[in-house]
Image (spheres, helix red, strand yellow):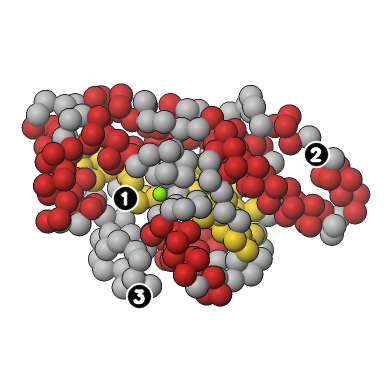
């Protein structure tokens, strides 16, 4: 396996919308959502909305069906499969929830590319109602000020980095919650903020606070090109320690691994 860990945010990074809003809007509950939004934290609101949808007769199958129609740029799927094919260790780090993320990744044949999904827990209770909980059961205590109360992605990223010693991290995200992990990346790591989105604005306020190299992206094609360029750069740098492999890597036909990758074997269950 290559010495690269790629950590993806999910909403507006892997898919092109916010999955929470997509479900609420698609199942006709936008008005209630907008009314409750000022009254409770987002994570608790989504759990409440799942209860409301259940009370209105919407099943988890209805929720899954709308999730499968959430838009995803085909170049993002291609980028994920190519990075996986090049031996990167791919993780999801998201403030959505397990049910939403797994349903969408399964639908697009991408679930097997990821070794780990870090997100808010979900379960379907005995009544068939989807329950969503917080990632952190107790206050996370992060002082950066941009993490929601239920999840500090920076703390999760610290754990990922601690378990991936010697590997370089590429982090992709769009939201305020992606700022804290961006600050915790090291000098050999890379952050790929989505240009024009909240994490990009936060980074631009004071770029000197980040140690990692910053490589913005705008759309799926842009993400694919940028991510694979960074992965190849790391692989070539690694290969300089092994001169015999260098030429092979520098001539690696990336286009050949972008489509039609076989599904992986031995993927870790999360
Ligand atoms: Mg996001």
Which of marks 1 and 2 precedes in the sequence? Answer: 1
- Distance in Å between CA atoms under marks 2 and 3: 43 Å
Measuring 57% from the left and 54% from the top, which residue is drawn there? 216
Q: Nearer the viewer, mark 2 or mark 1?
A: 2
Query: Residues at badges 2 and 1 in contact (C-beta under 8 Å)?
Result: no
Measuring 15% from the left and 55% from the top, which residue is drawn there? 38
In the picture, which quadrant includes the C terminus? top left
Residue under label 2 = 252
Residue under label 3 = 143
Q: Is mark 3 within 8 Å of ligand 1?
A: no
Q: Position of residue 11 (x, y in %)?
A: 39, 44
- Say which quarter of the image contains residue 106: top left
Q: Nearer the viewer, mark 3 or mark 1?
A: 3
Is residue 159 visible in the rendered image? The answer is: no
Label 2 SS: loop
Foreground residue among 18 and 204: 204
Residue under label 1 = 120
- Distance in Å between CA atoms under marks 2 and 1: 38 Å
Q: Mark 2: few, some, or many residues within 10 Å (few <14, many ≥20)?
A: some
Is 242 above or below relative to 202? above
Which of marks 3 and 2 precedes in the sequence? Answer: 3
Q: Mark 1: few, some, or many residues within 10 Å (few <14, many ≥20)?
A: many
């Amino acid at each position: 396996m290559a010495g690269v860990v790629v950590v993806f945010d999910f909403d507006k990074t892997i898919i092109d919308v916010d999955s929470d809003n997509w479900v609420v809007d698609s199942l006709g509950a936008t008005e209630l959502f907008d009314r409750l939004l000022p009254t409770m934290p987002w994570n608790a609101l989504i759990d409440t909305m799942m209860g409301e949808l259940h009370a209105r007769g919407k099943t988890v199958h209805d929720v899954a069906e709308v999730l499968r129609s959430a838009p995803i740029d085909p170049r993002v799927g291609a980028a994920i499969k190519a990075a996986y094919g090049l031996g990167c260790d791919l993780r999801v780090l998201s403030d959505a929830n397990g049910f939403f993320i797994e349903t969408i990744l399964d639908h697009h044949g991408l679930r097997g590319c990821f070794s780990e999904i870090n997100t808010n827990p979900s379960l379907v209770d005995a009544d068939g109602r989807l329950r969503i909980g917080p990632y952190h059961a107790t206050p996370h205590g992060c002082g950066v000020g941009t993490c929601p109360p239920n999840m500090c992605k920076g703390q999760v990223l610290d754990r990922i980095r601690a378990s991936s010693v010697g590997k370089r991290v590429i982090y992709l995200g769009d939201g305020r919650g992606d700022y804290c992990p961006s600050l915790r990346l090291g000098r050999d790591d890379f952050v790929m903020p989505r240009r024009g989105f909240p994490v990009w604005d936060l980074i631009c306020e004071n770029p000197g606070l980040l140690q990692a190299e910053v490589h913005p992206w705008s759309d799926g094609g842009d993400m694919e090109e940028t991510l694979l360029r960074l992965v190849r750069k790391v692989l070539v740098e690694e290969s300089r320690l092994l001169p015999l492999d260098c030429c092979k890597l520098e001539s690696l036909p990336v286009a050949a691994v972008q489509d039609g990758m076989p599904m992986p074997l031995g993927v870790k269950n999360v």
